[in-house]
Image: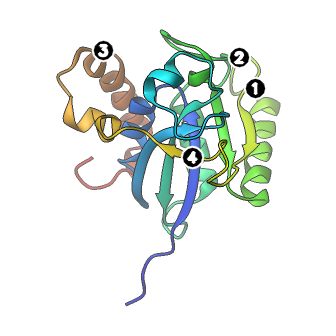
Amino acid sequence: MTAAVEEQATLGGGCFWCTEAVFVRLKGVAKVVSGYCGGGLPQPSYEQVCAGNTGHAEVVRILFDPTLISYRELLTIFFSSHDPTTPNRQGNDVGSQYRSVIFSHSQEQAAIARELIAEFEAEQVFSDPIVTEVRPLAGAPAAAGFWPAEGYHQEYFARHREQGYCQAVIAPKLAKFRAKFRDRLKDGA
């Protein structure tokens, strides 16, 4: 028996609690880690990122099996699970740390992202222009690399379903996601 091939995607679509809650439910996704990416400070803390001065975005690192879900499919779900037309904002979350951003792990990923954005723009899928950044991921130890968030941010929705933000923001987002992508969900998700 051979091990599944895993690839990585790093995506920022606002609050990482919301983004993680969506992607962890997909068939072909092995793991989702909340973190920070794109800033100039190594190993930033949540407080530093929330202050808005580090240049980091809240992101998720997704480990996935491309034989079960493609990178393009992940991006299609990414674009449908947040508003890619609002700069530095998702709902009530405001600041550059909540920007819509794709950190590509390869030139191929960057090309797929740009191609999909161009298709969405040509088809006018969104009423406003897409502002999602497509940036290369600088690998650690470079400061602009991916830094996992503190442990209490991991699996946040799964551990805090009754919390107010989870009920008011994440649960409705998940309900829409489940309805639209029912065929892509893991059993029991």
Nearer-N-terminus badge (4/3): 4
Mark 4 element type: loop
Mark 1 element type: loop
Q: Which mark is residue 146?
A: 4
Nearer-N-terminus badge (2/3): 2
User: What amino acid type is highlighted by mark number 4?
Assistant: Phe
* For the residues bearing labels 2 and 1, Cβ distance under 8 angstroms: yes
The x, y position of residue 151, in whole percent, is 31, 41
The x, y position of residue 68, in whole percent, is 48, 66
Nearer-N-terminus badge (1/3): 1
User: Mark 1 and mark 4: span between their CA atoms?
Assistant: 32 Å
User: Mark 2 and mark 1: span between their CA atoms?
Assistant: 6 Å
User: What amino acid type is highlighted by mark number 3?
Assistant: Ala
68 with respect to 24 (left or right): right
According to the image, label 1 marks what residue? Answer: 124
According to the image, label 3 marks what residue? Answer: 168
The front one of 51 and 75 is 51
According to the image, label 2 marks what residue? Answer: 127
The x, y position of residue 165, in whole percent, is 30, 17
User: What amino acid type is highlighted by mark number 1?
Assistant: Gln
